Amino acid sequence: MAAAGIALHPACRVRREGFGLLFYDLRGPRLLFAETGDLIPVDFFGTVRGRDELPEGVSDRQKTVLQKFISQLLAKGFLREQ
Amino acid sequence: MSNKYVEKGLRAPVNLTWEVSLACNLRCTTCLSSSGEPAHGELSTAEALALVEQVHQARVFQINFGGGEPFMRPDFEEILSACHTRGIMTCISTNGTLIDAERVARLSASKGLVAIQVSLDGARPETCDAIRGKGVFNRAIEAVKLLAATSIPTSINTVLTTQNASEIPAMYELARSLGVSLRVSRFRPSGRGADNWEELRPTPTQLIEFSDWLAQSGDVRTGDSFFSLTSQERQGLGLNLCGAAKLTCCVGPTGNMYPCAFLQTDRFLAGSLRERSFQQIWDDSEIYDSFRSLRIHSCEECTRFDQCHGGCPAVAYHLKNDINGGDPECLERCVTSIADTARSAAAA
């Protein structure tokens, strides 16, 4: 069975800012300021991704940080499993 | 709220308040923009659609449409559709009188990209109609009922005045009974609201009572209206500083850009969309720069400074002609005002 995919919640948007990524949730509305720098491109959230999929070329340490970040986005409802 | 990111300036506003027309079929006494007849030289359909594209390119998340009554513009649904095609979220502030079943059906097709606020200024027809006009209460309620039967997020929006302050808890119950939420907005002395300010402004006692009620009513929305009044516990639900030119800005009916809807005067004109692009004005306007660096030093010693950062500059401007002077109706000043009045009464 294939792993579940994850995607930006339909009520949410994300864009690039100088500090990293800015997430917006219409349902609050609420904002999430993610100090990710250049670690993850905004396009990463443009399509359905595998649960463990990460941008290419990141180090093991960065992988750990990004996995935790994506888990937080899921927990906060900015991302959802498909 | 991550103030450090906001104060550095974002690449674009999070949301835009767009007053698409000054035209309105009502003459509410609290109207922030003295709406009635359309403004001379309002944006054409082509100009409005071009602005939607610019806002999309800037990656603004949401447009809050107001006026005037947005549905007075014959092309308003076309503008709305252009937003939704681009994935821009929209919120419409309407008086509800031009909403019928056919319009609701069309709005429902937006697939979650539209939310609607229907203005209602009292829990009783007499209270609401004294502010908004005869028969408006019932017409607005009918609109809310039509919207509540759909999946469109709908709220009742109430401007707090001295006339309806005692009815706010009943407004909350009314909204609940209709299956929608309640949003309470601050009455500000701009537009027709300035003409009726002394008659309609809530008293300091009413503001404090409302503040206490708000602290216990976590599901009532206030946007950034009452951050100068809200309790520390409520801060987690919203802003603790003015978002003008930092998180939001305003486009007026003729394409002029301002820091917020309550500061649509020549003094605060950031630029015209007929002369410069949306992004250029956001990036380069000296007016916007001045708001991003605005510090209300006179409030810095206040124990509540971290909660409100000086409050609403628009109220300070309209009442004291000084955006640096601190909000004249903040919670601290309400308490001081009541104490002064009590002392004066005791001395008399």
Image (spheres, rainbow, N blue to C red):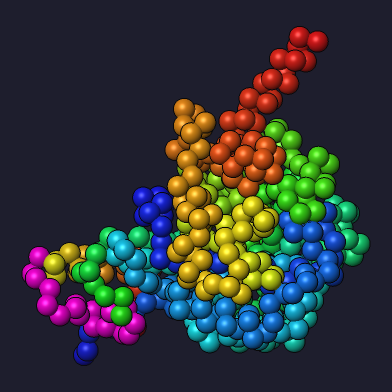
Q: How many marks?
A: 0
Q: Is residue B274 above or below residue B290?
A: below
Location of residue B74 in the rendering, given as x and y in whole percent from the top left corner: 76, 83
Q: Quadrant of residue A45?
A: bottom left
Question: Is residue A47 shown left or right of residue B260?
Answer: left
Q: Residue at x 74, y 40 (%)?
A: B202
Q: From this viewpoint, is residue B228 visible?
A: no
Q: What secondary structure characterizes most of the magenta part?
A: loop
- Observer-nearest of B131 and B281: B281
Q: Residue furthest front?
A: B275
Question: Is residue B247 shown left or right of residue B270?
Answer: left
Q: Please give the range of residues in magenta.
A: A44-61
Q: Residue furthest right?
A: B134
Q: Residue furthest left?
A: A60
Location of residue B103 in the rendering, given as x and y in whole percent from the top left corner: 73, 84
Q: Residue furthest top?
A: B347
Q: Residue at x 58, y 36 (%)?
A: B325
